Image (tube, rainbow, N blue to C red):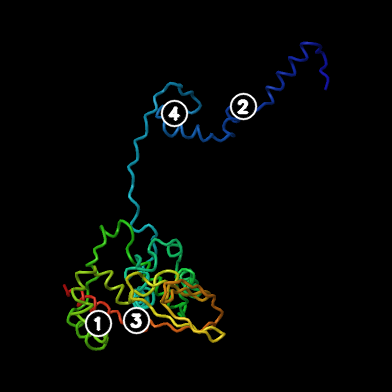
Amino acid sequence: MTWRGCTGVAAVAAMSVWALVLQPPAESAERAQPATVEQQTTQATNPAALAAPAGSAVPANSAVPASPARPATAPAAGDFPRPPADPAARARGKQIFSVNCGFCHGSDARGGEGGPNLLRSPLVLNDRGGEAIYAVMLAGRVEQGMPKFNLTFENAADIAAYVHSIPVGRTQGGVFDPKAILVGNAAAGKAYFYGKGHCSRCHSLQGDFAHIGARFDPKTLQDNIVSGAATARLGAPLPTAPPQKIRITLPSGEVMSGTLISIDDFNLSFTDAGGNRHTLRRDGDQPRVEINNPMQAHLDMVRNWEDRDIHNLTAFLVGQQ
């Protein structure tokens, strides 16, 4: 581009003036640029910036009052809120849980002799409607002493509804009181002990059950009623359980016997009469194993327990001081 009549410095000055004329107004340019996060924060917290007319400068040394500290807020009721479950589903789930799960995880799902606390289990917390719980129940965790359960997805959904309904955290209202589970009828429990339950065939209130209510707290006593204090993790008997005698017939026909230490689908360990420890590999039904478990009657009743019988029997035995 040439400028007629302008040479040298004059031409340069003319071009600069023309460029300023073509440049958009400074106010428009500023309006086109959004405020930065820092500017927005300053405007939001500085009363001088809010009161100043648009486009005017705010003194750098204008006082900015400190924002009052926000008080710490307590978590909402329930750290993992869910819509309330159907009461009928919760009732079914409680029954199924008591019969199939309570003997390891405790009657309140807060952990028992052989199983962990389910209320703070990440798997249970992330479960919505029984899908995660069902997968574990179907496959089991044999290496941790949990067998497979032949239950339906609907059963797992009911169990989830019950477990998710148990208060967790601050909503519990304090430390768990073991006596809170004493909701049964002691007289009905006595009738069950001597009648339908056949408990008196093996136990005596003047013998092994003498003062049993003073020896165990209600929660432990109820857990032991259902589990028979029989099995901990990895299939090992609890220290308080009576010894389980085992008889093993090897494929060669040789017979070994002793006291069971642990057993699962892959291995079994036992001690012989001389105190020597043996560990054998299992492959299906070989070697053939026969276990004499004094608590087998309790295990056989696991799927036949009724919730009211468990609570009634607990109330009766707790009274045996």
3 or 2: mark nearer the eye: 3
* Disc 1/disc 4 C-alpha distance (Å): 84 Å
Which residue is drawn at the image coordinates 39% and 77% (left, top)?
100
Q: Residues within 10 Å of mark 4 (few under 14, many from 20)?
A: some
Circles 3 and 2 in contact, beta carbons < 8 Å: no
Q: Mark 1 = which residue?
A: 203
1 or 4: mark nearer the eye: 1
Badge number at residue 294: 3
Q: Going from the N terminus, do you reach mark 4 or mark 3 first?
A: 4
2 or 4: mark nearer the eye: 4
Q: Going from the N terminus, do you reach mark 2 or mark 4 first?
A: 2
Badge number at residue 25: 2
* Disc 2/disc 4 C-alpha distance (Å): 23 Å
* Disc 3/disc 2 C-alpha distance (Å): 96 Å
* Residue 302 versus residue 321 in the image, above or below: below
2 or 1: mark nearer the eye: 1
